[in-house]
């Protein structure tokens, strides 16, 4: 069932991997999202890995995930006829999303100013690596470059080894989801005043926003945080946050102060199994705040090391699923380091009927997707339709929406405009 | 014509910590009137968290809190006191949106859940956001974003290889994913309410929203059983691709991230680096992808004595994607962030002038802005109680003595 929230609104999605999630979110919320692809297909069709490692235009996992719910047309923006078709579509659309190099659409006569003359209501959203006005406005940026530029990479990895990105690159997803916020921020006044506007999303800034305010540490505390592997903290006090267990890893941060009840429950559990030391039982955890205050005494440091050693020895007697189940029961704040296999088997997600099945006749199988990102009482979000074949909706869009006849469409196809 | 996108939108904000306040920050910075209802019986833990002005703790000194709460007003009361809840209920008719981010039972226990509030205001849009959702066996799981990032699967794919331990992303990573979904939902629901008169309740589990940043791996696992693991800086379509160490500066390591997408870019990169003689295996993309380790050593040696910033400029001029691996000091001196007017130095009553992260997007006609620094705890209590609820100074004084408000 289609979500009602954005039903009746149309987005032209000209973006690549940086905007794909924005269009997907709009489609989830009920908008008619038309993926406008070059005749060779959107670049996201070529992003490895592929389903079953079988490369084709319809089997990139990234493409399947983030182009779902959209329609597809092929359109050659390098041809004058193609550009004219886009202008006609703009007149019938509410949003345009793009992530071309800054200025590219202007050169084609398809920049915001030109299109807004055709449709003053248009919201024209550009996703850019570094904004559209600075010295780096023409810089190119693969995902890893944006991750580095926004400061997230510097803080990930072990000292003595290179800084890291995540193995499923994230910067473009942040930019895409931010573009959804920004486009709807412009949508609200547009529906009242009848005027659209230009929206520019800055990927570098999106990554800076993942740093949890670390930017202020050097200024207010005089300290530059560095990558510290499985540890977290400052020069003065570092605490381990990833521990080995029998079949994987557990994440837990020992905190006192307001987090003391969890730590006390953990010590109780350890001592029931002979893994605690006397001082751990008698310690006043409520007033123990080296982690919060970022300052530790020598005694604190010795105790942190002892506790971490005992804790890992304790965890090594169990597997992560059992540790998590018992921690939930005892209200201890920890989490398993879950793989996608663990996520797929998670009882909470199952109880909320989270995952959705999406039939893919293109692949001859049904795939399982993450479900709606929220449960809405009046306008529920349903499962998306599968990602489209290249140009699958050319007839629907060019004939039914734009009013071309089959002869005209055949001519435009023959001359390479479509 | 309006100056801000959300002028006239009223938000009653019971949220705390990260996801909820960042969601309402989007609204407040775009002109919505946002009242943060801060409960003295459950003080926002971010008010207690570093970094603090002058590294000195204090309830009005945390930049962690401040950065997420610009442009808002603070009403401080004791929500465990029925009188305080009575005052809050009187604000509900004013609100278009109510947001809260407690563990599920809190608002129910206070009689402030959607079932109660909709009786007062049927067209209300209410968003609850907690870690694992309002229902299900783990609904009451308390925790924070670091743990959610582990539970979602982000830690599992962060590291050099599957044999060594995960090296997590910095901080409460999912706290910076979820608000992009919750803000999107609130904005769409607000517009829908304006057009149709229908409000609604939104139950957003941070877990379920954040998993959308792992969709390809989730789909792959269900279909084929393949488990995405830790692969360092591996790419399937760029080579070279990674972080390479440059010349140290001021005693600090400097690194540059480089991603080469095709053979033209590779030749351009070699040109920038003085056209060194190059192993035949590295001539084609396929060869480079197959020989990543020797390729990384080769590139690493070429780059090692260059300055990261200068090399970035030369590589980018040649069409190669590259940028210094920026730390937080670098970010404050970054020309591109400066050109986007990203950093804001705002004046706060107790903290003085401190640095705030700015907006991640720009609207041309109704640009958002960090309109005011974060509020002091209860800074606007008197103003709200007098102007909006019509209480007299004497009544407010009485409520303070009864410790209903602070």
Image: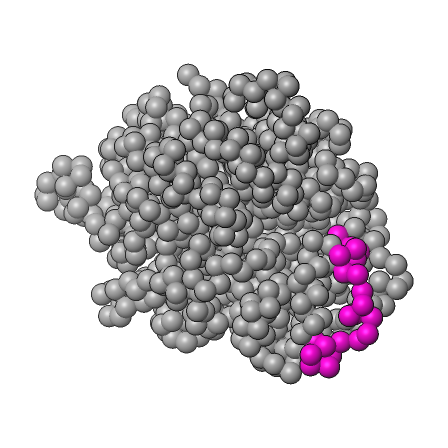
Q: Position of residue A242 (x, y in %)?
A: 66, 68
Residue in the picture at 70% in, 72% down: A268
Q: Position of residue A112 (x, y in %)?
A: 39, 29
Above or below, comparing residue B8 to residue B27 in the picture = above
Q: How many marks?
A: 0
Is any atom of residue A36 visible in this view? no
Above or below, comparing residue B277 to residue A381 in the picture = below
Residue in the picture at 31% in, 49% down: A380
Towards the viewer: A303 or B175: A303
Q: Quadrant of residue A92?
A: top left
Above or below, comparing residue A244 to residue A233 in the picture = below
Q: Quadrant of residue A289?
A: bottom right
Q: Farthest right residue? A: A298
Q: Position of residue A365 (x, y in %)?
A: 26, 70
Magenta region: which residues?
Answer: A270-292
User: Does residue A273 show up magenta in the picture?
Assistant: yes
Is any atom of residue B135 visible in this view? yes
- Locate the N terminus of chain B and report the quarter of the image it occupies: top left
Q: Is residue A171 left or right of residue B375?
A: left
Q: Is residue A369 left or right of residue A298?
A: left
- Locate the C terminus of chain B and report the quarter of the image it occupies: top right
């Amino acid at each position: 069932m289609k979500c009602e929230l954005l039903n009746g609104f149309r987005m032209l999605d000209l973006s690549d991997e940086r905007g794909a999630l924005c269009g997907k979110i709009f489609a989830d919320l009920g908008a008619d999202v038309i993926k406008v692809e070059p005749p060779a297909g959107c670049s996201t069709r070529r992003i490895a890995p592929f389903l079953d490692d079988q490369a084709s235009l319809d089997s990139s996992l990234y493409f399947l995930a983030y182009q779902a719910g959209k329609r597809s047309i092929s359109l050659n923006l390098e041809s004058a006829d193609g550009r004219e078709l886009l202008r006609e579509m703009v007149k019938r659309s509410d949003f345009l999303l793009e992530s071309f190099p800054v200025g590219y659409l202007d050169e084609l006569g398809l920049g915001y100013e030109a299109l807004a003359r055709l449709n003053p209501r248009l919201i024209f959203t550009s996703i850019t690596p570094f904004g559209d006005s600075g010295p780096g406005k023409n810089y190119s940026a693969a995902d890893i470059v944006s991750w580095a530029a926004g400061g997230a990479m510097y803080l990930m990895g072990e000292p003595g080894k290179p800084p890291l990105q995540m193995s499923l690159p994230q910067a473009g997803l942040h930019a895409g989801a931010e573009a959804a916020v920004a486009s709807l921020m412009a949508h609200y006044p547009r529906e009242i005043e009848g005027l659209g506007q230009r929206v520019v999303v800055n990927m570098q800034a999106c990554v800076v926003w993942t740093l949890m305010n670390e930017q202020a540490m050097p200024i207010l505390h005089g300290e530059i945080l560095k990558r510290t592997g499985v540890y977290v903290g400052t020069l003065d006090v570092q605490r381990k946050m990833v521990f080995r267990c029998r079949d994987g890893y557990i994440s837990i941060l020992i905190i006192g102060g307001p987090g003391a009840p969890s730590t006390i429950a953990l010590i109780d559990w350890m001592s029931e199994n002979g893994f605690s030391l006397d001082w751990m039982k008698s310690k006043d955890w409520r007033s123990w705040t080296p982690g919060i205050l970022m300052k530790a005494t020598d005694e604190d440091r010795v105790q942190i090391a002892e506790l971490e050693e005992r804790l890992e020895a304790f965890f090594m007697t169990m597997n992560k699923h059992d540790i998590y189940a018992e921690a939930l029961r005892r209200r201890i704040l920890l989490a398993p380091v879950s793989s996608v296999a663990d996520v797929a088997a998670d009882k909470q997600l199952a109880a909320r009927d989270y995952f959705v099945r999406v039939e893919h006749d293109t692949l001859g199988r049904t795939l399982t997707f993450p479900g709606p990102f929220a449960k809405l009482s009046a306008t529920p979000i349903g499962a998306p339709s599968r990602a489209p074949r290249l140009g699958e909706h050319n007839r629907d869009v060019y004939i039914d929406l734009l009013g071309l006849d089959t002869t005209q469409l055949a001519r435009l196809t023959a001359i390479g405009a479509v | 014509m309006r100056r801000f996108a959300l002028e006239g939108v009223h938000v009653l904000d019971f949220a705390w910590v990260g996801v909820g306040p960042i969601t309402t920050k989007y609204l407040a910075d775009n002109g919505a009137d946002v009242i943060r209802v801060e409960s003295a019986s459950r003080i926002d833990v971010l008010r207690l968290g570093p970094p603090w002005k002058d590294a000195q703790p204090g309830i009005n000194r945390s930049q962690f809190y401040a950065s997420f709460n610009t442009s808002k007003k603070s009403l401080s009361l004791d929500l465990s006191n029925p009188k305080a809840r009575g005052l809050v209920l009187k604000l509900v008719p004013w609100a278009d949106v109510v947001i809260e981010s407690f563990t599920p039972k809190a608002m129910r226990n206070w009689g402030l859940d959607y079932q109660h509030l909709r009786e007062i205001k049927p067209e209300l849009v209410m968003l609850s956001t907690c870690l694992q959702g309002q229902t299900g066996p783990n609904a009451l799981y308390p925790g924070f974003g670091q743990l959610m990032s582990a539970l979602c699967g982000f830690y599992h794919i962060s590291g050099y290889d599957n044999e060594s331990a995960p090296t997590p992303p910095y901080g409460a990573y999912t706290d910076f994913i979820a608000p992009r979904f919750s803000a999107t939902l609130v904005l769409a629901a607000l517009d829908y309410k304006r057009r149709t008169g229908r409000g609604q309740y939104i139950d957003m589990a941070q877990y379920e929203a954040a998993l959308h940043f792992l969709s390809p791996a989730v789909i792959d696992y269900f279909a084929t059983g393949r488990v995405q693991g830790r692969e360092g800086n591996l790419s399937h379509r760029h080579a070279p691709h990674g972080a390479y160490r440059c010349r140290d500066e001021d005693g600090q390591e400097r690194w540059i991230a480089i991603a080469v997408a095709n053979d033209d870019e590779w030749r351009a990169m070699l040109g920038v680096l003085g056209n060194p003689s190059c192993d035949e295996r590295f001539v084609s993309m396929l060869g480079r992808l197959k020989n990543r380790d020797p390729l990384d050593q080769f590139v690493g040696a070429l780059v090692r004595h260059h300055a990261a910033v200068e090399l970035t400029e030369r590589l980018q001029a040649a069409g190669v994607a590259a940028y210094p691996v920026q730390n937080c000091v670098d970010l404050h001196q970054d020309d591109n962030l400066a050109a986007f007017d990203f950093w804001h130095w705002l004046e706060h009553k107790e903290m003085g002038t401190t640095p705030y992260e700015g907006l991640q997007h720009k609207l041309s006609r109704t640009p958002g802005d960090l309109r005011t620094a974060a509020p002091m705890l209860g800074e606007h209590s008197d103003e709200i109680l007098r102007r909006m609820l019509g209480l007299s100074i004497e009544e407010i004084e009485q409520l303070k003595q009864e410790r209903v408000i602070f």
